[in-house]
Image: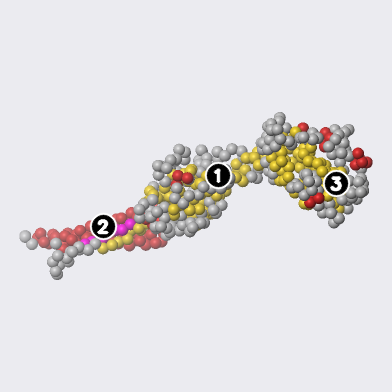
Amino acid sequence: MSINSALLAGVSGLVANSSALAAISDNISNVNSIAYKRNEISFGNVVTSQSVEGRYSAGGVQGITRQFVSQQGLLQASSSSTDLAISGDGFFVVTNKGEGLTAADARAFTRSGSFMVDRDGFLVNKSNFYLQGWPVQPDGSFDVSGADLAKMSSINVKNLGSSVEPTSSIGISANLNKQGVVSAGEATYNNNTVASMTDYATDPLTGTKPDFVIEANVIDSTGGSRKVAIALLKDDSANPNTWHAEMYTIPTSLVTTGGRPGQLARGALQFSQNGSVDLANSTLFGAPGAPAELVLAASGTASTPRWANSLGIAAQTLELDLSKVTQYSAASTVNAVTSNGAGVGNVVSIQVDKEGIISAIYDNSQTYRIAKVGLATFPNADGLQAISGNAYRASAPAGQLTLKEAGVGGAGQIASSNLEASTVDLSAEFTALIQTQKAYSASSKIITTADQMLEELLNIKR
C-alpha cells in the first residue's frame, strides 16, 4: 500500500543520508591527510512499478558512492628531499614488504609520497608502504617495462657502501718560457738513459735536471692518491719551439715500466710560431699526432707500464688535455691543473629529479644513480578500490594497469621536496553537512507522518 511504501521510502532516505554523512565525515577528518581524495555520495531515485492506476507507490532513494581519485591536489613544499609528489597523472607503486618480494606479493598504488628512510635503508611512507622502482643496471640504465611489476623492487638508499671514482682525465693549463736559457744539461740529455729527467726525480745526483715540472694527482681504483709529473727541458737553439718531455710517477717506484724506472711516457712537445701547442707534431705519447692517452695496466699483470705489484690496484686509463699549454715569452708557470676522480666517500644525502631518478650524493662530490621511480596509470583511476593507508588496489572498473616513466606518455612529473595536499574543501563539506542533516530530518518526518497515518487507520476499528 502507498502508506507502507512511503514509510519504506523514508527509511531509504535515512540510510542514504547516513551514508552521505559517513562520506562527509571521512572527508572532513582527512582534510590534512596527504594526497587524500574526497568521496561523495550521489543520490539516485528508485522507481517501483505502479500496478494500480491512480495509486502511487514510493520507491525511495539510493546512495551511489563516487571517488574523485583522479582529482589533483595542490602541491605543497616540504623540507625533506624524500617527500615526493606527482604533478599530473599516475600513482606510486608500493608494497607492504621491503625484502623477499615476489611476483605473487600484492602491489598497491598511492599518491601519498611522504617517504622516509627506515632503519634498513628502504623508502617507506607513513602508512608503511615501501616505494618500488626500477633498480639501476651496471651500465647506468634502467630496465623499464610497461607492464611487468616484477621488474620493480623496493628502493634502498642506505646500503650502498662507499664510493670511489678513479681519475680518467687530466687537463693542464700552463706556459713555458720561450726566452728561457737552454740548460747545460741539454747537450748530454737522453730520455732513456741515466741522463733522463725521470732519474733526476729519483736522485738529483743522476739524470738531467728539468727546466720546469708540472705535477698532478691521480685517484686510483681504491681511492688512493698518486702523483704524476711532466718534466720539461727546453731543446737547443736549433729547435726553439721544441721541449723535451717525460712523464713519470712520484715516487718512481709506483709503476713498473719497460724503460726507465717510473717513466710513463717520453718524447717532445712541439709548439707553433704563435706559441700554441702543436699536438699533431708532438711525440710525448708516441708517434706524432698520437692520442694524449696513457694506459696503466693492473698490478700483477705482465703488461707495462703497470701499477706496482705491491699496490694491488686495477688498470687505469688517463687522458691528458694539453691543448692549453703555451710557449710565450713569459715566465714558466702552471695556471691550472684539473682532473676528475674522487677518493673514498660516503652517502650524505638523497636527491630525486623530476624524471623520478633517485641518486645518492656522496661527501666526495660524487653522484650515483640508485633507482628510477615508475608511475602506474589507469584508464579510469576513479574506479580503483580504496584500501587503508590512503592507497588503492587495481580493479576491473579501473582498467588495465600501465607502468610509465615520469613525464613520458602522459604520466605526471615527480616533484621532490613536495607533498600533494588533500582535495577536501571544508566549506563545501560543511555546506553538504547541513544539507545532509536537513535531508535526514525530512526523511524522519516522512516516517513520523506515515506512522501517524497508520495509527489513524488502526483507529478506524475503534
Could you tell which of marks 3 and 1 lies nearer the N-terminus?
A: 1
Image quarter hosting the C terminus: bottom left
Badge 3 element: strand
In the shown orientation, is residue 294 left or right of residue 442? right
In the displayed structure, would residue 440 be above or below residue 216?
below
**Which residue in the structure is indicated by mark 2?**
14
Compare residues 308 and 358 and report the one nearer the observer: 308
Could you tell which of marks 1 and 2 lies nearer the N-terminus?
A: 2
Image position, residue 210 (x, y; %): 86, 41
Furthest residue toward top: 310
In the shown orientation, is residue 288 left or right of residue 110? right
Image position, residue 197 (x, y; %): 84, 38
Of badges 1 and 2, the one in the foreground is: 1
Return the mark for residue 177: none
- Crowd class of label 1 (few under 14; some 14 to 19; many from 20; radius 10 Å): few
- Crowd class of label 2 (few under 14; some 14 to 19; many from 20; radius 10 Å): many
The residue under the point 82% across, 47% down is: 269
Residue 313 visible in the current orientation: yes
Return the mark for residue 243: 3
* Inter-mark Cα distance, 1 to 2: 59 Å
Res 429 quadrant in image: bottom left
Badge 1 element: loop
In the displayed structure, would residue 245 be above or below residue 401?
above
- Crowd class of label 3 (few under 14; some 14 to 19; many from 20; radius 10 Å): many
Compare residues 209 and 384 and report the one nearer the observer: 209
The residue under the point 40% across, 44% down is: 106
- Which portion, as a residue range, is magenta? 59-65
